[in-house]
């Protein structure tokens, strides 16, 4: 790892060529536990080392780490926006998922403290903002689920995320997700600032956000929805089940 720390790409190549180095080795103990050469090079800003590892030594920049993340996700979780930028500029793929099905952007959307990482990712490629994971949801859905209003505003207003997009997993919109998880502030933000349609019917389920929450028994956001124009008498084929349960 010393050659990586010193940004000595030639030394890295020399070590690799004589078989004395394993570029996928993870540090086992201490503060840098779990670091690989790419993780360390990203943290230190050594883009040349990352590029050399990828181009000359067939190191997979998306290779999963022992903690089920990837090098880029590790940088996001560490809240190291500079490392995120260095990795992206060096050619590390932006949308590779962790073993749990999360992309770097989804991980960035989970906490307000990761906003600089979210911005670094979207500034590099804004098209990722509506990307859905293999689990069928986007970073905007995740931000709505956890109530990360700052991320919601940034993705919608700065990077153009579609606030009415239905997820592939269960045909829910970001507004439905926010309402279902009781994120009242995010519900109001989506409607008032992000052009979320409070009475929009989803294509797949024909639910509005109000009937969706009623069907799932999630009522904490009802007042916010009604005060922002939700129609409570909207008909749905499941009405008998929605409102007549014992």
Image (tube, rainbow, N blue to C red):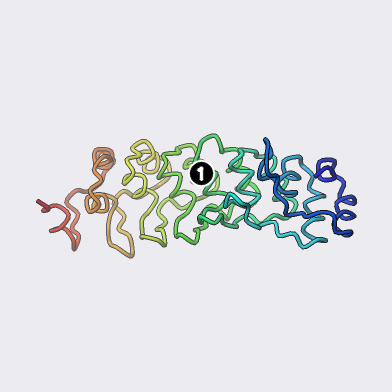
Residue 85 shows in this picture: no
Q: Residue at x 45, y 44 (%)?
A: 143
Residue 106 x %, y %: 52, 49
Q: Residue at x 66, y 58 (%)?
A: 63
Residue 57 x %, y %: 80, 61
Residue 142 shows in this picture: yes
Q: Residue at x 62, y 56 (%)?
A: 64
Q: Residue at x 28, y 54 (%)?
A: 208
Q: Residues within 10 Å of mark 1 (few under 14, many from 20)?
A: many
Which residue occupies the foreground of this view, 209 or 36?
A: 36
Total labels drawn: 1
222 in relation to 59, above or below: above
- Classify residue 226 by image quadrant: top left
Which residue occupies the foreground of this view, 5 or 222?
A: 5
Q: Which residue is mark 1?
A: 109
In the image, taking residue 202 as reference, residue 226 lies left or right, namely left
- Classify residue 189 by image quadrant: top left
Q: In which quadrant of the rendered image does the N terminus lie?
A: top right
In the image, taking residue 55 as reference, residue 157 lies left or right, namely left
Element carrying mark 1: helix
224 in relation to 243, above or below: above
Query: In the image as oriented, which residue stretches furthest toward the bottom?
Result: 204
Residue 233 x %, y %: 16, 51
Which residue occupies the foreground of this view, 213 or 157?
A: 213
């Amino acid at each position: 790892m010393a050659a990586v720390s010193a940004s000595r790409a030639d030394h890295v190549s020399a070590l690799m060529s004589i078989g004395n180095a394993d570029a996928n080795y993870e540090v086992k103990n201490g503060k840098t536990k779990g670091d690989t050469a790419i993780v360390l090079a990203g943290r230190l800003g050594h883009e040349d080392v990352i590029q050399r590892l990828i181009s000359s030594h067939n190191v997979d920049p998306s290779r999963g780490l022992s903690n089920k993340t990837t090098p880029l996700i590790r940088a996001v979780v560490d809240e190291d926006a500079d490392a995120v930028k260095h990795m992206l500029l060096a050619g590390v793929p932006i949308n590779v998922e962790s073993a749990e099905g999360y992309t770097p952007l989804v991980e960035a959307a989970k906490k307000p403290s990761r906003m600089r990482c979210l911005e670094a990712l979207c500034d590099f490629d804004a098209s990722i903002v509506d990307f859905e994971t293999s689990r069928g949801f986007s970073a905007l859905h995740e931000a709505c689920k956890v109530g990360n209003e700052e991320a919601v505003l940034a993705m919608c207003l700065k990077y153009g995320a579609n606030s009415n997009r239905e997820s592939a997993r269960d045909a829910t919109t970001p507004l439905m997700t926010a309402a279902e998880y009781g994120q009242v502030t995010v519900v109001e933000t989506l409607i008032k600032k992000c052009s979320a349609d409070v009475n929009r019917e989803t294509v797949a389920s024909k639910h509005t956000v109000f009937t969706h929450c009623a069907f799932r028994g999630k009522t904490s956001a009802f007042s916010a929805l009604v005060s922002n124009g939700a129609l409570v008498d909207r008909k749905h084929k499941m009405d008998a089940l929605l409102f007549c349960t014992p």
